[in-house]
Amino acid sequence: MKVTKYNKLVRDNIPLIIEKSGKKAIVKRLTDEDYIDALNLKLGEELVKYLESGEIEELADMLEVIYGILDYKGISISQFENVRKDKLKKRGSFKERLMLVEVVEE
């Protein structure tokens, strides 16, 4: 018998997919504190995957994790979008591709 340990947050359908492949998935439901910790860790993992691969699919995974964090914090996607739009209005976007090289004070 081969056992592979993961101890990481997975999407809801992953255990079913594993079971359909003829394997047995052992899962546990996380406490609130463990859940937010796992979401934060997962966000970092997905960022690393995106930076290594450049694949859009990894950005979609990051967004799903962000949605999970928002849900945990009781913030709707439309509320989050309003925060994004407000920041866009005040600070701009990244479309101009500007790199701040230095600031000189006299």
Image (cartoon, rainbow, N blue to C red):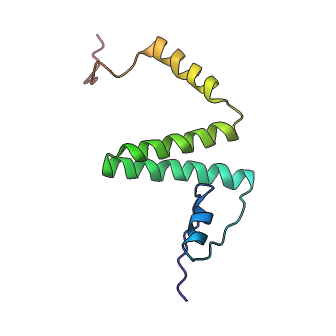
Question: In the image, is 39 to the left or to the right of 100?
Answer: right
Residue drawn at 68 percent across, 31 percent down? 75
Residue sitting at x 56%, y 40%: 66
User: Residue 90 or 104: which is nearer the viewer?
Assistant: 90
Where does the image place residue 77, in percent across and percent down from the top left?
Answer: 61, 29
Q: How many marks?
A: 0
- Measured as percent of width and height from the top left, residue 50 is found at 37, 47
The foreground one among 84 and 20 is 20
Residue placed most toward the observer, 19 or 81: 19
Residue at the image point whose x is 69% and y is 41% from the top: 72
Q: Which of the pair 50/18 is nearer the observer?
A: 18
**Residue 106: which quarter of the image?**
top left
Outermost left residue: 101
**Left of 76 or right of it: where is 8?**
left
Could you tell whether 100 is left or right of 1 in the image?
Answer: left
Residue 29 point in image, percent of width and height: 72, 60
- Is residue 24 shown above or below 50? below
* Above or below for 101 versus 56: above
